[in-house]
Amino acid sequence: MRASATTDTPEATGADTVAVGVFEDEAVRRPALAALVASGEARRAFRHLALVHAEGQRWLVVGLGERGSFDGERARVAAAVAHARALELGTRELCWELPDGADDRIVSGIVCGTILAGYRFERYRREAEGHALEELIVSAERDVDAAVRDAAVVAEAQNAARELQDTPANDLTPTALGERAAALEGLDVEVDGRGFLRERGMGAFAAVAQGSDVEPALVVARYDGRASPLLGLVGKAVTHDTGGLSIKPAGQMPDMKYDMSGGAAVLEATAAIAQLGLPVRVVAVIGATENAINGVATKPGDVVRALDGTTIEVTNTDAEGRLVLADCLLHARALGAERLVDLATLTGGIVTALGSVYAGLFASDDAWAEALLAAGADAGEALWRMPLHPAYEELLHSRVADLVNAHRERKAHAIQGATFLARFAGDGPWAHIDMAGVSHDLGRPYAAKGGSGWGVRLLVELARGLGREPH
């Protein structure tokens, strides 16, 4: 979908449908639309839609609710519901008239909400379902071209992550994910396989990968935008998770293709950061593998050795993501990362705690946590900070190794995972984001079913904020 900005009036754009938002207790400028609101056919209530033909133009009147409550997230939702109605009308070119006084966050929300709502996963369909919106035009009294352009880049990156998420594991292998990384512009990419993991001493990652005949991939993508502290982004990309010998229930298996969602978000966010030319340095480390079962799969009770020599008793092969991430965090540190964030669909415990509203944030550093919370608020990808406390370390005690990968009881399950990862994150600022509840089937109008691409906007906003810091 093309996205552009103009200072022309909506009528002058030639768009076949114009969307106009109306706030509570505010006047409507166009007489025909004002009459529609006055009659009650169109309402100012948030998400309410009404259609009118006037002055040779087709208008969608979109209720925006109270102005004080209208933020970037509400703009995304309003744009998505308007997009759905526009498609029903056969719209090809949709023009949004930017509400008076709207800042760039609202511009971004309208663009993102429209582009995200336009995502369809049709790779395996013989024919596409219906037509697609071809162009979005944002009409504003001021120049919003840069805001529209940047928002479109981020939204397309999020949709690219969704495409990776929704692709089944027989096609999206770790090798295929590495090929996607290598094809991205603006990044220096290295992809290594099983032999490298063993030679490098990444025994925790290799232990997960050994249960599958499919080649794993350690993907490293670098972007150098300016001499700044090196931001390390680490993503879990288990392209399918059977649970290993600690096997998952059959009903959960089809959705286990989404266990690579953290890696997809890290990869596409890094590509968007490069495309936007943000003044930061980034190294992305993505651990891609299947967690499957063959004759040499890791068994509960096995002991493996991570890159730093830490020995780990594998009590549960379905707690595999933390094994992959442990070595990836260590590798990112070895590559010079000074501040770390890892994204992973790590635990069902975080879904129980937070549902699909927040992702769980665990952080070793208060200032780093605040930077991420602020980025999440700006991006509309909300984080809720969870506790890390020395007392939880007792849950990782092993009688035969340095630690276990999972306590036999599931209490504090999400915190167990974060506490485990903290052992490998080093002394610098580090944060772990458990995104299991928000990775797919988000239930929002712009990402209702399938992969959500969650995390792309968050990481781009984090990088944008770091780019503003003095160095």
Image (cartoon, rainbow, N blue to C red):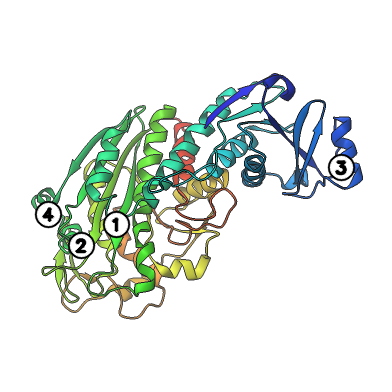
- Ranked by sequence position, the earlier of labels 1 and 4 is 4
User: Which is more foreground, mark 1 or mark 3?
Assistant: 3
- Per the model, the C-alpha gap separating discs 2 and 3 is 60 Å
Expressed as whole percent of the image width and height from the top left, the position of residue 372 reads: 48, 48
- The type of residue carrying mark 2 is Val
Expressed as whole percent of the image width and height from the top left, the position of residue 324 reads: 25, 58
The quarter of the displayed image where residue 424 is located:
bottom left
Q: Nearer the viewer, residue 7 or 353?
A: 7
- Residue assigned mark 1: 238
Is 33 displayed left or right of 225 in the figure? Answer: right
Marks 1 and 2: in contact by CB < 8 Å?
yes
Q: Does dot 4 land on a helix, a strand or a loop?
A: loop
Q: Residue at x 58, y 23 (%)?
A: 145
- Per the model, the C-alpha gap separating discs 1 and 3 is 51 Å
Q: Nearer the viewer, residue 202 or 251?
A: 251
- Ranked by sequence position, the earlier of labels 2 and 1 is 2
- Residue assigned mark 4: 201
Expressed as whole percent of the image width and height from the top left, the position of residue 269 reads: 40, 40
- Per the model, the C-alpha gap separating discs 2 and 1 is 9 Å
The quarter of the displayed image where residue 176 is located:
top left
